[in-house]
Amino acid sequence: MSSDLSVPDEAVAARVLRHFRVSLEERGYHADSAQQSAIQHLAEWLEEFLGARRSWLRKPPAGVYLWGSVGRGKSFVMDCFFAAVPIQAKRRVHFHSFLQELQIRMLAFAGQADPLVKVARQIAEQTRLLCFDEFHVHDIGDAMLLGRMLKVLVEEGVGMVCTSNYPPSGLCPNPLYRERFRPAIELLEKRFDVLPLDGGEDYRLRATPLENWGSYLWPARADDLALIGQRLGLDDKASFDQVLQVNHHPLRVHALEDDRAWLDFSELFERPRSAADYLWLIEHFPRMAVSGLGPLGDYPPDVSMRFLNFIDIAYDRQLRLQLFASVSLERLAEGGAAIDFARTLSRLRQLKVEPLSA
């Protein structure tokens, strides 16, 4: 494990709390009591965790699991905490990106015994503190991969901080998979400090649209070349009706030009696609238009879930997105059965919503 601990004279907990206060002042924010309690707990846990390397009389909790409803400030609290941690061997990762990294790194050990354990030990050698944002599990493959990874990282002494919309008991809600994920839930409940951050208002409801995030346009035709081409910035150099090979699977796109792509909702989400596919697309086309979006209740739950995963990844990777829908944002989830839509809706609300004239 890396040993680049370089704690300054200032106590670790005091450093974290000071940075939190400064961050609040810079943004003109006021922390509510739940946020203040959370950062206080994180600061004290970190000081105990880093000090535990010199005292083995009592092992501190393996990490902190911070959960609460959408918009309660979980990511802000963790960002402030992470920035103040006085070590270099620290990482803040998004759920989907980390799973993709695991799968790629495991390929280096293909054919060997238990490649997951080898990768986990590599990560432990390089990382003292690992912060997961938006921790959630809905796919059994991801659940099994992440559950085993957590166990090895805890055993190797890596400290972890997670934010989630769910308590550990609410992870992996699919009853077909829940028993197989139960050991990971029990690990979180026994070895982590589980903190609720679920009081106060939803701060995202009063957030202004993010200029670079994009737009939500409705009611829009799925084939409106003039509108979509103009919003995406396509010109006479654009290529139309192309087929890409995305992680060895074909994907048809309406148009491509440089770093821009126009894609269809049904092609992106009605066919089986993985988070790795969406990451690949966003990395190659950081400006994207998606047309043909309708009420999510018109689709099976797996289609809605792919859309929600895509929005998670797009938001985290700062994709510049133009969404063209047949219904208003408020009606998008009518009749839908997908879980996690509250988080997605809070992110979509940060798009510039643009009603189109008839």
Image: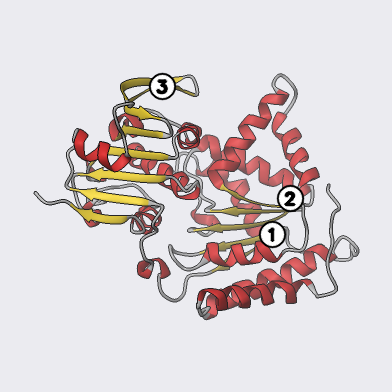
Name the quadrant containing residue 329.
bottom left
**Up-down: is 182 above or below 160?**
above
Q: Is residue 20 left or right of residue 298?
A: right
Q: Mark 3 to mark 2: distance in Å?
A: 40 Å
Numbered mark located on residue 63 in the image? 1
Residue with the mark numbered 3: 244
Q: Secondary structure at mark 1?
A: strand
**Up-down: is 294 above or below 163?**
above
Q: Secondary structure at mark 2?
A: helix
- Image coordinates for residue 51, horizontal then vertical, percent: 84, 66
The residue most toward the left is 358
Residue with the mark numbered 2: 154
Task: Name the kind of residue labelled 2 in the image.
Answer: Val
Q: Nearer the viewer, residue 127 or 230?
A: 230
Q: Secondary structure at mark 3?
A: strand
Residue 186 can be seen, yes or no: yes
Instruction: Determine crowd level at label 3: few under 14, some 14-19, many 20+ residues with C-alpha closer than 10 A.
Output: some
Q: Is residue 344 left or right of residue 219?
A: right
Task: Name the kind of residue labelled 1 in the image.
Answer: Gly
Task: Name the kind of residue labelled 3 in the image.
Answer: Leu
> Tags 1 and 2 in contact by the CB under 8 Å rule?
yes
Circle nearer the N terminus (3, 1):
1
**Up-down: is 256 above or below 197?**
above
* Disc nearest the viewer among 3 and 2: 3
The residue at 52%/60% (across/down) is: 167
Circle nearer the N terminus (1, 2):
1
The residue at 51%/44% (across/down) is: 178
Q: Mark 3 to mark 1: distance in Å?
A: 42 Å
